[in-house]
Image (tube, helix red, strand yellow):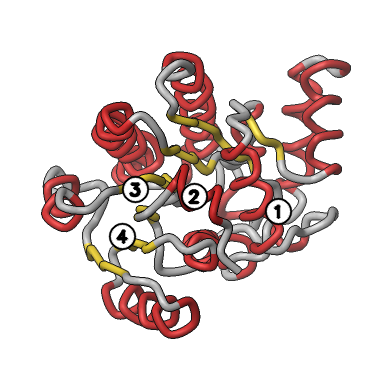
Amino acid sequence: MKTIAFENKFGPWALVTGGSSGLGVGFAHNLAAKGLNVVLTGRREALLTEVAQQLEERHGIQTRVVATDLTSDEALDEIRKVTDELDIGTVISNAGVASMGAMLKIDADELGRNLKLNTTAHLRISHHFGQRLVERGKGGILFVGSMAGMQGTPLGANYAGAKGYVHNLAQALNYELRNSGVHVSVVAPGPTDTPGLNARTDIDLAKIPGPVMSVDKLVSIGLKGLAQNKPLVVAGLSNRMMDFMFRRILPRQTGRNMMGMMISKHAPRELKLN
């Protein structure tokens, strides 16, 4: 069922980065169900096209596909070729990747590529479309962060540092654009039922105890937070409790140590330093 108020504020088109799998697909379907047309970006053109066809058949909306690597210098130009003539009202800055393990055990070039996708891509997308949204006087940008970005996360140091950047970027933009009519939020998922949790080849994060959130629930929480213009949306009661404990009760070093022990327990020897 279309949500007219949401469509009027955040439509008629949405851009979803990382739209070929996981949370990107979930956001695309939720937005399409609300009546928004969707532009999908990602590296895997065949998967993007498949998702686009599903969106059109299931929700009766229009789609566009931009197959591009967001770490490339040409990525924004490729996206602009498709979106400059569209009235983009929502941006879901979702694309990201994590190489888990002790930082010194991971190739430096791989860490650099990951950092560029997890930070610079968010910056360039939000800078370009933020200007467009301010000009139209309404719309929203939703960044996808991570609970890992709430503190230093051992065996995920590069990823945690990058997500910390995303969290701070989004919350600062929320303030800067507070009088523009444009909403800016960052949603911080914990363990979520995506390939990033269940199909890893480094550390089996699915073995870490705790509740796993469905994609549909996480997406719904994130979009509700965007509609309410919340700077930070911590998704789920258990994650909110952990965030409160780590930031308000325990010393930051204790939270870091707890995360390190949980992850290290399931890390293979070759990805640990000791």
Mark sitting earlier along the chain (4/1): 4
The residue type indicated by label 1 comes to Pro
> According to the image, label 2 marks what residue?
98
Give the mark toward the camera: 3 or 1: 1
Q: Residue at x 24, y 56 (%)?
A: 69
Q: Are marks 4 and 3 in contact (CB under 8 Å)?
A: no
Mark 2 to mark 4 CA distance (whole Å): 19 Å
Mark sitting earlier along the chain (3/1): 3
> According to the image, label 4 marks what residue?
41
Q: Is residue 246 left or right of residue 152?
A: right
Which label was assigned to residue 110? 3
Residue 241 higher or lower than 206, as above or below: above
Q: Is residue 180 left or right of residue 161?
A: left
Mark 4 to mark 3 CA distance (whole Å): 21 Å
Quarter of the rendering occupied by the C terminus: top right
Return the residue nearer the eye: 44 or 161.
Answer: 44
Residue 66 higher or lower than 249, as above or below: below
The residue type indicated by label 2 comes to Ala
Q: Quadrant of residue 73?
A: top left
Residue 223 appears at what percent x and percent y? 59, 47
> According to the image, label 1 marks what residue?
191
Which label was assigned to residue 10? none
Mark 3 to mark 1 CA distance (whole Å): 23 Å
The residue type indicated by label 3 comes to Glu
Residue 76 appears at what percent x and percent y? 18, 45
